[in-house]
Image: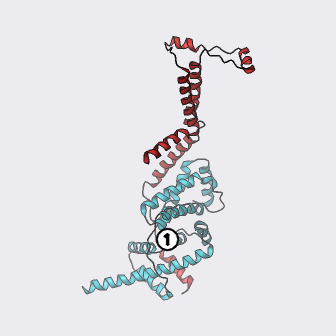
Chain colours: A cyan, B red
Amino acid sequence: MEKTEELKIIEQVKQGDLLSFRLLVDKYKNMAYHIALQVVRNNEDAEEIAQDSFLKAYQSINNFRGESKFSTWFYRIVYNQAVSKTRKRKIETSNIDEVEISDHEIAQAYEEFTLLEKEERSIQLNEAISKLKEDESLLITLFYLDENSIEEISEITNYSVANVKVKLFRARKKLFTILTESNVNRTTEFQKQMNH
Amino acid sequence: MDENNLNKYSEKLFENFKLEKVPANFTEKLMVRIEQEKLTEIKKNSIFSKKFLLAFMLTFLSIFAIGILFQGKTSEGGTTANIIEKVKLPDYHFGKILELLNFNFEISLFVKLIILSVIALVIIDLLTGSILDYFIDSKAKKGNT
């Protein structure tokens, strides 16, 4: 769906066309769910947040003036809904210290990662992302999975551009640290099994 | 550590990464919800609310009741009353209507006033939603203490 086509659809939604809104739902539902999941870390809550966000977007579609991308406007709604939900309960994330990681270690972690089966890679990466803090995993998701620019992420999360850059840098470093650790753990497990 | 290098490898990590999918019935559930919300919105925005219509009907009934309860009574007022007397008003033969309905009975002025007060209270409460609530609340408070 191109931008002009999307704007046309949004105009139809503004006139009350529910079928056109369905097209938007189908396009953005997975990303909305994924964003919510990064913040609340619970499938049921994430689904509820995604539902509520679409409902809110439909009700306030007239407030969307097309100054930014529809996705940016909508993801902001999803993010706010998710944040207000997490305010009610504290989410536990593992506390990973920020350690220095060399270029060589990054390359090695990646090489070992590529040796895994496709499915295993997905599981490993999902696990690594879930070990990041909510805002870090959210930024990673928005930047790499939906290809939002730093400015768009800043608009969605209300963080300053500089803050997004810093957080994103930290998140990448942590992600590779986690992957390196899990590679080490896997090798140790493998050696143990071989010794037995 | 080179930031560009880190970014390059991160991009590679996510190359074949797939998003978590929403449950299969997600869209259907959402559409039903939106339809329901739309209906609620329409109900909310209807010109006359249920409360207003009820209050309107009660006002009409109370006028009818005043006609029945005070039939045949004329007030001896000042000039305004004299002017009204000069104006030919349609003759509502409530007494005759009641005779036809076999509904003729005597009620003291005190009882009539009580009935009218209750009707007035109900109408005011329907419009403001406060008087009966106040009594209910104070009763509840007493019950709790």
Disc 1 marks which amino acid? Glu
* Total numbered labels: 1
The x, y position of residue A128, in whole percent, is: 43, 75
Q: Is A24 left or right of A193, judged from the image as shown?
A: right
Compared to B75, does B124 lie above or below? below
**Residue B89 at what x, y percent from top left?**
68, 15
Q: Which residue is drawn at 55% across and 76% down?
A: A168
Compared to residue A13, the image places residue A160 above or below, namely: below
Instruction: List x then y, in percent, for residue B7.
Output: 54, 79
Q: Which residue: 66% across, 61% down?
A: A67
Query: Horizontal placement of A67 versus B36: left or right?
Result: right
Give the camera-side residue of B112 and B45. B112
Residue beneath label 1, please? A134
Q: Which of A56 and A32 lies nearest the eye of the viewer?
A: A56
Query: On the rendered image, what quadrant is the N terminus of chain A found in?
Result: bottom right
Quadrant into which the C terminus of chain A falls: bottom left
Viewer-closest of A175 and B103: B103
Q: Front-most of A163 and A114? A: A163
Q: Residues within 10 Å of mark 1 (few under 14, many from 20)?
A: many
In the displayed structure image, the side of residue B80 where residue A107 appears, left or right = left
- Which image quadrant is residue B59 in? top right
Q: Which chain carries label 1?
A: A
Residue at figure coordinates x 49%, y 43% from the top left: B138
- Residue A11 screen position, x and y as percent: 63, 52
Secondary structure under tag 1 reads helix
